Amino acid sequence: MMRTGVIVCVFIVMQLFQLSGTAQLFNTINQAEDSLKKLFSLATDRIEMETRRSSGQQFATLFYQTLEMQGSFTYPFDSLPTISKLTSPDNTFRLYTWNIPLLSGANTFYGAIQFITEASDSFHVIVLHDKSEEILQPEIRILSPQQWFGAIYYQVIPEQTLTGEVIYTLLGWHGENLLLTTRLIDILSISPSREVQFGKPMFCNYEESKPSRIIFRYAAKASMILRYEEQYIVTSKKWNIKRREYESQLEKAFVIVSDRLVPSDPQLAGQYEYYIPAGDAVDGFIFRDGCWHFIEDIDVRNPK
């Protein structure tokens, strides 16, 4: 058994050595993608923790180099379906995020932001470094690419502040461990010189502290809705004397819809690994007057 284990380890090391430092040898992105697929399989399928770490880092290095190849900005990377690939609606950037699950139930997150130059013949790639385990009070922190609260993003929403600055609201998932998981609303800002910043106090009435990002913590076995979509929201209510009931004025608008999270038992308040969606209550955020406004009790049964 020991001899078999040694042979397997040697085989893995040979594969990693063969694939490392080869980005410059590829003539096409398709060739690079084939090697990326093998590396990602090693990083996610192998039981050996050291193999996961080393192949995960090899994958990231090779992927960042591939993003500098001609045609990568529009390349689909179809053989890497677990990597999130988002292009901003204004075509300013492309955002890539993925995770390598650890045996403990935690995750290591990787990411990159790709910009295309004005000449359209070269790319500027910013690598995101996951430091989520080291970040205290992430809700109020303004973070850089070197100190990123790692997540897999699945929606990007461009909006404009009152000063004319374009911001990008990101919806994402961040797995904590076997018991606790999170979803988050983060804000991406990009300066004219393409300096990147995560987090911005753009949530006007959510809390007195005006958080830089919203983090929803809940049980890993539960499923939470957090998405951006068109819904009808109540703007005002008037009492109808004849009918003796309130009549609601509705407005169709795009909002971030989220399940309201509650503890499965009132005695478990504050222990977020036991929080689940209420089931009958949905809240959200609507962008008005340059910031996100919190609204309660959205009726998602209304037709879109």
Image: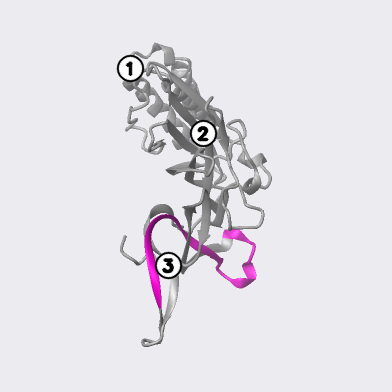
The three-letter amino acid code for the residue at tag 3 is Val
Instruction: Find disc 2 in the rendering and name its residue.
Output: 110
Indicate the position of residue 58 as horizontal and vertical percent values.
50, 24
| Residue at image location 33% in from the left, 27% down from the top | 75
The three-letter amino acid code for the residue at tag 2 is Tyr
Q: Earlier in the sequence, mark 1 or mark 3?
A: 1
| Above or below, comparing residue 125 to residue 26 in the picture | below
Which of 166/215 is in front?
Answer: 166
Which of 39/2 is in front?
Answer: 39
Task: State the SS at label 3.
Answer: strand
Q: Quadrant of the C terminus?
A: bottom left
Instruction: Find disc 1 in the rendering and name its residue.
Output: 28
Q: Are marks 2 and 3 in contact (CB under 8 Å)?
A: no
Indicate the position of residue 222 as horizontal and vertical percent values.
48, 59
The quadrant in which residue 223 appears is bottom left
Disc nearest the viewer among 2 and 3: 3
Task: State the SS at label 1.
Answer: loop
The quadrant in which residue 129 appears is top right
Disc nearest the viewer among 1 and 3: 3
Indicate the position of residue 23 as horizontal and vertical percent values.
43, 16
| Residue at image location 35% in from the left, 24% down from the top | 34
Instruction: Find disc 3 in the rendering and name its residue.
Output: 234
Residue 253 in sight: yes
Alpha-carbon span between mark 1 and mark 3: 53 Å
Q: Which residues are magenta?
A: 247-273
Residue 7 in sight: no
Indicate the position of residue 161 as horizontal and vertical percent values.
52, 43
The three-letter amino acid code for the residue at tag 1 is Thr
Question: For the residue carrying disc 2, how many other residues have a C-alpha within 10 Å: few (<14), some (14-19), or many (20+)?
Answer: many
